[in-house]
Amino acid sequence: MTLTITDSVGERLDAYLAGRLPALSRSKIQSLIKAGHVQLNDTRVKARTSVKSGDTITVNIPEEAPTELVAQDIPLSVLHEDDDLIVINKAHGMVVHPAAGNPDGTLVNALLHHCAGQLAIDEDETRPGIVHRLDKDTSGCIVVAKTKPALTGLVNQFADRSTAKLYLAVAQSPPKETHQTVFNNIARHPVHRQRMDVCNPGSGKPAITDLHLLHTAPDGTSLILCALHTGRTHQIRVHNHYLGHPLLGDPIYAKPARQVFSVPRLMLHAWRLGIAHPITGEWIQNEAPIPKEFHTWTDQVTERLTQICAIRDSKEFDALW
């Protein structure tokens, strides 16, 4: 892949790539640079080399042999578990399934140990039980299927948009509108391949997000409740960036120099996930505890969050706004 730098001056090459290639660890990037798989302006350089606007970086990631999935004893926060499925409060920084640059240490590796290998297998054997995904730096609710019938039922629910997904996000600045629905198409950026972007209606995939402003701090940073109707890659991050208020701590869509509040992570949390049990039909409402990094904002709206937690149907939800 080829990246053209437009927004960085004086940053180390490895640090720049780490912010644009979240699927790769910084140590992996450094090893690629050392092996000559990364070139700056068609020249082999060192990881500490500074980059500037206008530079071109070429990254060649060698194909790796398929990694055999291994069970690993990694602590998990379990929100719900039965014979058919398990719901996890995924920690930020954890990759969902093995891939290039992340052969182990993922949620799948942890679940293989926790569930003693009992995860539903579909066409892609590297992603057993995976129905939907969360970005590496997003925390919160994720449901995984243990059995094939459960996998099929959950996949259908996500496809027909009958699940209920609420996220909490902290943006760099307040939205212009208190409540709004963003409806457009999202596709991979034609140049920066690690980014997604809003595109013309004739391309990409439709993405729909409801945004509700919950609180704006004196410094302008804002807590936003995001209701997802679709599940596109980086959807919430792209929509907030598109509206002019990218999320705090976002290494791809927010420029660190413009962040007015220092945070140690991407400020996006999959707070609540409602699903119909794929076997029994019972509605299961899962809630992932709000991370401490969000408390500066969420502590100001505890009553409103309690009201949201008490909601049982869409009419009650709409009545809040």
Image (cartoon, rainbow, N blue to C red):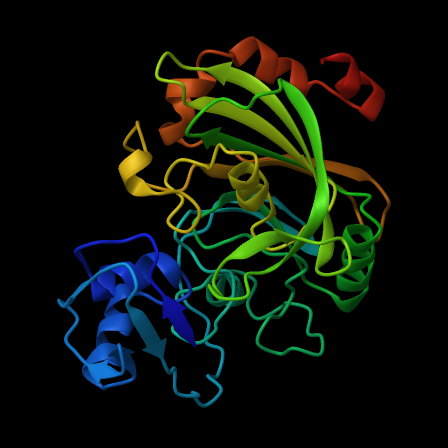
Residue at the spot 14% in from the left edge and 68% down from the top edge: 49
Identity of the residue drawn at 29% across and 84% down? 37
Q: Which residue is drawn at 58% across and 53% down?
A: 197
- The answer to whether any part of residue 103 appears in the image is no
The residue located at (28%, 71%) in the rendering is 29
* Residue 285 appears in the rendering: yes
Q: In this view, does 319 lie above or below 123?
A: above
> Which quadrant is home to the N terminus?
bottom left
Vertical order, 44 against 271 (above or below): below
The answer to which quarter of the image holds residue 213 is top right
Q: Could you say which quadrant of the image residue 181 lies in?
A: top right
Q: In this view, does 290 lie above or below 39?
A: above
Q: Is residue 282 left or right of residue 135?
A: right
Nearer to us in this view, 264 or 103: 264
Q: Where is residue 288 in the image (x, y as percent from the top left)?
A: 54, 35
Tell whether 39 sits left or right of 75: left
296 left or right of 271 in image: left
Answer with the quarter of the image where residue 318 lies: top right
163 lies above or below 168: below
Q: In which quarter of the image is the C terminus?
A: top right
Where does residue 153 sit, x and y in percent of width and height? 82, 57
In percent of width and height, residue 120 lies at 69, 69
